[in-house]
């Protein structure tokens, strides 16, 4: 709970730091819808998963260099993880996937083929997710001083 609250408090559209709290659905089928909402874009009600995936790519490219944190990543299927890894490789977005369980064998194999690091302490998570400054604009719950550091700053 403490990690989730810390991450949610760092959501900051102005600083291009987006936090996604996915809807629990089989296979992560609402993931793209939830990412669009976190980016401040209202998804098309009848858009299929492929159209939403395309819309996420367009929205992330428009955002420029950004950070995207996906909570509940342990609930996503391997295909969703592979899609997020592909997004990371093809656009200027850094992804943090919060996984609250031991990594399944297939996921560990996928991660061997991409740059990643494991952060397993609250302090490490808090360092990656400083609270967003209080102010106008859509935000998740929480407030506090300090912007999210720019991509590539450490």
Image (tube, rainbow, N blue to C red):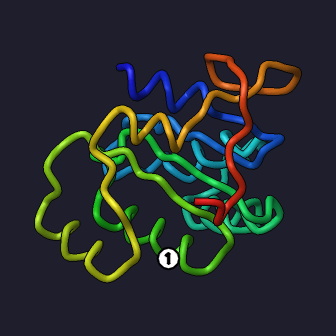
Quarter the C terminus occupies: bottom right
User: Which one is nearer the viewer's eye here, 75 or 90?
Assistant: 90
Horizontal side of residue 47 vs 98, given as left or right: right
82 over 43 or under it: above or below = below
User: Which one is nearer the viewer's eye here, 1 or 59?
Assistant: 1
Q: Residue at x 72, y 46 (%)?
A: 39
Q: Position of residue 8 (x, y in %)?
A: 55, 28
Residue 124 picture quarter: top left
Q: Position of residue 25 (x, y in %)?
A: 37, 40
Quarter the N terminus occupies: top left
**Residue located beneath label 1 in the image:** 86
Q: Residues within 10 Å of mark 1 (few under 14, many from 20)?
A: few
Horizontal side of residue 38 vs 24, given as left or right: right
User: Which one is nearer the viewer's eye here, 146 or 44?
Assistant: 146
Q: Position of residue 130 (x, y in %)?
A: 60, 33
Residue 34 picture quarter: top right
Find the residue positioned furthest to the right.
Answer: 136
- Asked which secondary structure carries label 1, the reply is helix
97 over 87 or under it: above or below = above
Q: Position of residue 151 (x, y in %)?
A: 67, 61
Q: Residue at x 33, y 49 (%)?
A: 119
State how many labels appear. 1
5 over 15 or under it: above or below = above
Q: Residue at x 43, y 27 (%)?
A: 4
């Amino acid at each position: 709970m403490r990690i989730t609250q810390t991450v949610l408090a760092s959501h900051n559209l102005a600083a291009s730091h987006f936090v996604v709290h996915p809807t629990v659905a089989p296979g992560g089928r609402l993931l793209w819808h939830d990412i669009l909402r976190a980016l401040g874009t209202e998804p098309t009600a009848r858009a299929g998963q492929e159209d939403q995936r395309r819309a996420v790519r367009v929205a992330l490219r428009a955002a420029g260099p950004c950070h995207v944190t996906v909570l509940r990543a342990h609930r996503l299927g391997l295909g969703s993880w592979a899609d997020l890894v592909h997004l990371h490789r093809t656009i200027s977005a850094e992804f943090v996937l919060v996984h609250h369980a031991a990594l399944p064998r297939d996921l560990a194999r996928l991660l061997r083929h991409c740059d990643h690091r494991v952060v397993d302490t609250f302090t490490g998570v808090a360092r990656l997710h400083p609270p967003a400054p209080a102010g106008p604009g859509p935000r998740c719950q929480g407030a506090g001083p300090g912007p999210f550091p720019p991509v590539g700053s450490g």
